[in-house]
Image: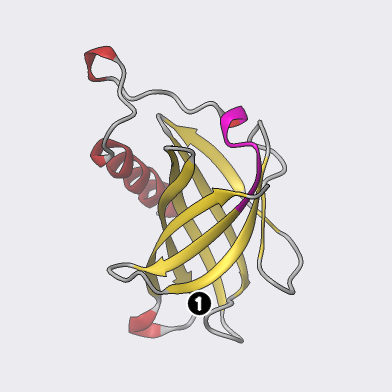
Amino acid sequence: MRPILLFCCALSFTACAKGGEQAGGEAATLNLADVAGKWTIQSMAEGSDSVLVTYELNATATTEGWTIVFPGRDPIPLHVTTGGDSVVTHAGPFQSVLRPGVMVSTEGAMRLVNGQLEGWSVAHYQGAGADSVLRIRQRGARTP
């Protein structure tokens, strides 16, 4: 079920994205070399500009070796694929930063827009009942 959900979310994200189009209406293909490096990513709840958590994203020029690092934590490996102009990610399960003691898995997509990464992530909390899903906006700047 999750691969289908991830595919549908990535497809809808790239279909709704503005800009990044080539002649004929085709979406530009993302080159991972363009996003390779270290990024500082801010995560905000959907509909809010308040930053919930800031983390480091370490990106490579391939789909291998990507990690996220929350302050005071070990790196968490990211499974990465590309779709059109987006990088699609999956992480977890890992210990939640926002909900201590709860395991979480995330999936999302980001695009390179005017030199910054922008996108979203969906967090799936284990055993959280009706409050088990959180949609998060993300934006990131390359770390010098």
| Whether residue 128 is situated above or below residue 38 in the rendered picture | below
- At label 1, counting other C-alpha atoms closer than 10 Å, the crowd grade (few under 14, some 14-19, many 20 or more) is some
Q: Residue at x 29, y 20 (%)?
A: 26
Residue 137 falls within the magenta-colored stretch: no
- Give 17 or 63, whichever is nearer the viewer: 17
Give residue 99's position: percent from left, percent from top: 53, 83
Residue 34 falls within the magenta-colored stretch: yes
| Whether residue 123 is situated above or below residue 88 in the rendered picture | below
Q: Residue at x 34, y 28 (%)?
A: 20
Q: Is residue 144 toward the left or the right of residue 27 in the image?
A: right
- Give 40 or 33, whichever is nearer the viewer: 40
Coloring scheme of the render?
secondary structure
Q: Is residue 125 toward the left or the right of residue 100 in the image?
A: left
Give residue 84's position: percent from left, percent from top: 40, 29
Give residue 93's position: percent from left, percent from top: 60, 66
Give residue 4's position: percent from left, percent from top: 38, 47
Magenta part of the protein: which range?
Answer: 33-39
Mark 1 = which residue?
A: 126
Which structural element holds mark 1?
loop
Quarter occupied by residue 28: top left
| Whether residue 40 is situated above or below residue 130 in the rendered picture | above
- Give 62 or 90, whichever is nearer the viewer: 62
